Amino acid sequence: MSDHITEIVIFTLLFLLVSGMGFVAARWRAPKDMAHLDEWGLGGRSFGGWITWFLVGGDLYTAYTFVAVPALIFGAGAAGFFAVPYTVVIYPLFFLILIRLWSVSHRHGFVTPADFVRSRFDSPLLALLVAITGIVATMPYIALQLVGIEAVLKTMGVTGESAFARHLPIIIAFAILAAYTYQSGLRAPALIAFVKDTLIYIVIIVAVLYLPYKLGGWGSIFDDANAKFQASKAPGDGIILNANNQLQYITLALGSALALFLYPHSITGVLASKNRNVIKRNMSALPAYSLLLGLIALLGYMAISAGVKPLPGAKAGSVDSNTVVPLLFDQQFPSWFAGVAFAAIGIGALVPAAIMSIAAANLFTRNIYKEYLKKDATPAQEANVSKITSLVVKVGAVACIIFLDPQFSIDLQLIGGIIILQTGPAVALGLFIRWLHRWALIAGWAAGMAMGMWMLYNIPNAATGRKHFGGSAFLLSDLGFDSQKTIYVGFVAVAVNLLVAVVVTLILRAAKTPDGMDHTTPDDYFADEGDPRLEKARTTPDADPIASST
């Protein structure tokens, strides 16, 4: 640890700076009353273009992204670049979806996507499934942010003999995060995102200019990476895709793009915007982060060229590939700059972790607590329950890292991306059409979940010796096709979901099964700032979604 004193000092100082900002955020754009879910959980629905850009960007591009994408490219090559095209195609795909969701949510006071589903399809059960799915998918995502911090701490030599001592810095960090999130709500990560994203931009721009010069140029970097993958002779590895993994690459990129803005934390950032134009501008400007992600991904090849060797993993004989990027900065840069880079990764975990815990808490409060436990809950009670739930969520995330193998959290997040896709027909398609029957959507959700879990269960991982849940690439031959190509599990699962939803809808429509009442109107999806009904909804942000729409 003594060799990393400078890094530790800079990391600690920057961490304390943003922690102080988190507590000050309660006074930033201070509302008249913080005891409203609209204020605590959505920042007063008042964020403008720059704040939303930093908030959503900081939410989508996380600490785990910073370490995991280059680590994947370090280990597998071109297949790891799937994260770049999916963050490009996502914005035109969701451009119209998100502005419609913003309008209907602001007019009716919806706080979560499950609120919208409850009102649109008149189905508490479907809303409950959407809420539970969102919470389950978000929990491991929060734990993964800790994996990024842990990789940095391990690189700086901050370890201990016992599990508690080894994780004490993470426990302290998340205790501070929990405290200022409890006090400031969504305003805390919104303010901290400015520092986090600025640091990451500086670190990456310096890295992509300096490291190629130091390592002999881009040609030398790619030659070294190509030599490594040719020597490994692994069938799917290389600096270009091969015939067997191209379909997996395409479906993984598209499936991941469809899933990203279905996550509750992504929607929370969008609903905090003050009008439709803010969302439109951000959907146009956020691809700048995709350019940054492409540069981050190239760090994996730079690490190969620099001869980086990952630190040992938790299990005997294993390696922790998530330490690749921290080690690259530790070995190739002065200690003070490595400390800045480590702080960027550490702070990069705090912003999304805060938003994710708030989003999960909002889902529990609005769609479980208020719907089933206390229908007459006041706005203040809702805000208080959401604050407490956000604390519980963070404690659960820390417990996952302390008591479970980090690889298990990664596997859970993999499952999370597949299950959140199953809310797409109700949430995304529901914004445009209501033809799909509410019971058909429930049947489709169940079928998609079952298909996804079955496929994941039957995927082995030869590298770890695991027989089940070994990845998301499913062999087409196991589906009866004469091919050794693989396909992304989530893509198949959501296709089954849609097929079942359509077939069951046709049956139920033919049987004239009651479909409930749509509590939204066509013009709700075009409401904007200044709309009289929208302003009325803002004055009663925690009114019952159904009551406020009739």
Image (cartoon, rainbow, N blue to C red):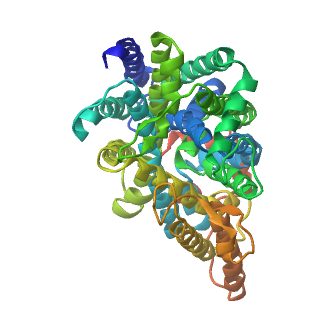
> Which quadrant, please, contains the N terminus?
top left
Q: Quadrant of residue 162?
A: top left
Q: Is residue 251 above or below residue 493?
A: above
Where is residue 449 shown, x and y percent of the image? 55, 69
Q: Is residue 303 above or below residue 427?
A: above
Where is residue 550 shown, x and y percent of the image? 59, 59
Horizontal arrangement in the rendering, residue 219 relative to residue 140 (left or right): right
Q: Give the total of numbered labels.
A: 0
Horizontal arrangement in the rendering, residue 450 relative to residue 23 (left or right): right
Instruction: State the residue lying farthest toward the bottom.
Output: 511
Q: Quadrant of residue 92?
A: top right
Q: Nearer the viewer, residue 314 or 194?
A: 314
Where is residue 178 shown, x and y percent of the image? 34, 34
Q: Quadrant of residue 75?
A: top right
Residue drawn at point x = 72 percent, y = 25 percent: 220
Residue 206 in view: yes
Q: Is residue 290 above or below residue 333?
A: below
Instruction: State the residue lying farthest toward the front.
Output: 231
Q: Nearer the viewer, residue 374 or 157?
A: 157
Residue 272 in view: no
Q: Nearer the viewer, residue 264 or 349?
A: 349
Where is residue 168 shown, x and y percent of the image? 26, 32
Residue drawn at point x = 78 percent, y = 56 percent: 243
Residue drawn at point x = 59 percent, y = 38 percent: 74
